[in-house]
Image (spheres, coloured by chain):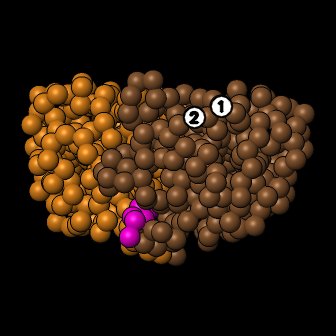
Chain colours: A orange, B brown
Amino acid sequence: MQIAVLGTGIVGRTLAARASELGHQVTIGTRDPTATLDRPADGRGNASFGEWQGATGVRLATFAEASEGAELVINATGGETTMAALTLAGAAQLAGKVLLDVSNPLDFSQGFPPTLFVKDTDSLAEQIQLAFPQVRVVKSLNTLTAALMVHPEILQGESTVFVSGDAADAKALVTGLLAEFGHTDVLDLGGLSTARGTEMFLPLWLRLWGALGTPMHNIKVVRSA
Amino acid sequence: MQIAVLGTGIVGRTLAARASELGHQVTIGTRDPTATLDRPADGRGNASFGEWQGATGVRLATFAEASEGAELVINATGGETTMAALTLAGAAQLAGKVLLDVSNPLDFSQGFPPTLFVKDTDSLAEQIQLAFPQVRVVKSLNTLTAALMVHPEILQGESTVFVSGDAADAKALVTGLLAEFGHTDVLDLGGLSTARGTEMFLPLWLRLWGALGTPMHNIKVVRSA
């Protein structure tokens, strides 16, 4: 299907490359494509966007152009820039689309570990839904580092990924993509307000990173017998 | 060892009964022992304290009396009453003790699901440590329903329990008790501030209860290969 991935960072690139590899038509959306292509490598080991793009079949366009033709829009921007990016994508371009929100409301202003700028009486996913009522928002994958979003089999055993959303058909579309990515334990938590649970998981996720020394970890929900 | 369990609810009773069964000398602490013994069953299927106590070897005393003779004090009161209970237990009686805090800062004033009255820039565990600097606070078991705290083998597979604390010897004492309870995957998250992670897990824990229809669930941390 036609997929727009909003965000040119590691999360956006990882999702875009994997979806493209799986045969989807993927466009990455950014604020200013020329500026994105002109930006040099970040000096932290990540290739420049231009270098990265050359090895993929992924197109680059503005947030609005990418969103317009897409059936599924994936918000892979940082939580702090999500609302600005979606505003640039445009309510008209997003209308009727499924929006998979993988972002987290992380506030890095006080250093590491970040805290949350939306806490458990609300969620970023619900704020997006409120601001863009014509979109069907599904929250998922935000409990995973980028590599595990698209290759959960890297871990030692099966782990769980969560889905929250108010529209059943939108959740079904996302769940199908999750299966293509290799997720075998997809747990539907219910309506979009359950994203309060998965967004609030980040403080524990960050401490697990600290204790294990790597972001390559996930949780498996263990049920009763 | 001598263990004081503060709190006469299901969590306190469950921990006290299991520790007693394992051979520890357990005293449950309460505000007013006479009132506790006079209170009838709650009408929700739980026995009165007196009925429950008759089937165990557990003694009942005031918060202060229970704490005074204990090597380990377990805070099994509700988060909203924790500070009042510990104040009644007394800084002098608690001094030098290991305090295992299994509580969560849950605010039920707006109905179900509850929200948190301490969020990720602090934790109830750290507030306890700050108020009682002579105590060695260890946070653990707060990510589990009472039955699973003491019988994790009920679940379909191995699951993880977390430990946070600033004193290594206190964590070792608690970890020993966790092993007696049957926990085989105890993950030391680090200092007490990592309790911010496990306390903030409650919003997801509550949604898992909603989705699975039971509080009998836990998570297993799946590591990278």
Question: Are the residues under marks 1 and 2 on the same chain?
Answer: yes
Give the amino acid type for the residue marked by disc 2 in the picture.
Answer: Arg
Q: Position of residue A86 (x, y in %)?
A: 26, 31
Describe the element under mark 2 as helix, strand or loop: loop
Name the residue located 44 percent from the left edge and 33 percent from the top edge. B114
Q: Position of residue B217 (x, y in %)?
A: 43, 59
Question: Left or right of A174: which side holds B102?
Answer: right
**Chain letter for the residue marked with disc 2 in the picture:** B
Q: Which quadrant of the structure image shows residue B93?
A: top right
Name the residue located 19 percent from the left edge and 40 percent from the top edge. A166
Describe the element under mark 1 as helix, strand or loop: helix
Question: Left or right of B193: which side holds B153?
Answer: left
Q: Which quadrant of the structure image shows residue A97?
A: top left
Name the residue located 58 percent from the left edge and 58 percent from the top edge. B149
Q: Which residues are magenta?
A: A216-225
Dot 2: within a 10 Å radius of its alpha carbon, few (fewer than 14), some, or many (20 or more) residues? few
Name the residue located 83 percent from the left edge and 55 percent from the top edge. B2
Q: Nearer the viewer, residue B13 or A214?
A: B13
Q: Position of residue A44 (x, y in %)?
A: 55, 52
Q: Which residue is mark 1?
A: B35
State the CA–CA distance, disc 1 to disc 2: 6 Å
Would you say residue A148 sits in the magenta stretch? Answer: no
Residue B224 tag number: none
Q: Which residue is mark 2?
A: B39
Q: Position of residue A99 (x, y in %)?
A: 21, 42
